[in-house]
Image (cartoon, grey):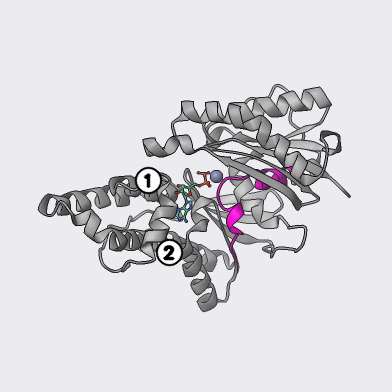
Amino acid sequence: MDITILGIESSCDDTSAAVLRDGVLLSNVIASQAVHVKYGGVIPELASRAHQQNIVPVVDTAIREAGITVDNIDAIAFTRGPGLLGSLLVGVSFAKGLALAKEIPMVEVNHLQGHIFSHFIDLPDRQLPHPGYPFLCLLVSGGHSQIARVTGPLEMEIIGTTIDDAAGEAFDKCAKIMGLPYPGGPVIDRLAAQGDPKAFRFAKPQVDGYDYSFSGLKTSFLYFVRDRMAENPRFIEENKADLCASLQRTIIDILLAKLIRAAKEYKIRDIAIAGGVSANSGLRKAVEEEGRRRGWRVFLPELKFTTDNAAMIAMVGYYRYLRGEFAPLDLAPVARLEEL
Ligand code: KG4
Ligand code: ZN
């Protein structure tokens, strides 16, 4: 059909643009913002300023790398939310400006749907495995931990969600407690590989249904480390790998327990994971192992589609385009999922 979608993502600290043609990725450019590292977390004001600096060259590069021109674009898909309002505003405003100037229709995209439907992107040289409907998707990012029951393109129901901190936040905050750089997830992942996951035990939450909670784990980790440091100021330094391995194991156990229960209850065997934390090597291995044990078909996203990227935004944009769901020019970004 030859539908070409330009995707734009600016919800947090990555400025990204991608071009997708009929679900096949032609380019995916991501500018990650190093400015936040020294603060140990994303500073919203600095994030929007960096997006403003990045957005034009990033979009330009994505179009060039795709081998197309602006005139070939059938629709501009942009992240409307959830995310940081100032950051979203940069992407939304840019999309509107381009749409207006070049008379290109726009489609709005829910960032979380982007993560989930990233499983349907194909590469120019090969098809990637796509889950069959219905499937369960464990969506784990810096802002959200959810289990979605996905029944068709853009058709989904959230059956469990985080009631406080997200899994990625647990990684990031515990990394900060250990004095590790931001974002903590990838650093803990790397250190955990050299540690003993059974060295330390941390509290696991008791939450009803399929909802998640990670703030208790973060607090118990903080007190545990603080107590040990009072006895031995070198405790973190001497036990870094074991701390990381034990923490990572606990987070994975919490995530998997509910996913396994949901798969049983809904009798679904196609199981996918998505979002920044789905890059975690321990989680990927654990889901695959469960899959072998339980006869699941497991779908792990390509690493480049785990953290924030515009390719996934373009993918959802493509589905919306096919349905004729276009966004008006006066659309405003939305920070919270509940308001989308
Ligand atoms: O999806 P994402 O890029 O942004 C949001 O939408 O929030 O997720 C970012 C989160 C961060 O918390 C980061 O620490 C985590 O994903 N993350 C990881 C890994 N890579 C990124 N967590 C654990 N292990 C990783 N390898
Ligand atoms: Zn994300």
110 and 84: which is toward the camera: 84
Q: Quadrant of the C terminus?
A: top right
Horizontal and vertical percent for residue 47? 51, 31
Q: Is residue 307 above or below residue 99?
A: below
The three-letter code of the residue at mark 2 reads: Ala
263 and 286: which is toward the camera: 286
Q: Residue at x 58, y 63 (%)?
A: 300
Q: Which residue lies under the disc numbered 1?
A: 181
Q: Is residue 150 above or below residue 78?
A: below
Q: Which residue lies under the disc numbered 2?
A: 257
The stretch drawn in magenta includes residue 45: no
Q: Secondary structure at mark 2?
A: helix
Q: Residue at x 54, y 37 (%)?
A: 337
Per the rendered image, the range of residues in magenta is 299-318
The three-letter code of the residue at mark 1 reads: Pro
Q: Secondary structure at mark 1?
A: loop
- Label whose residue precedes the other's in the sequence (1 or 2): 1
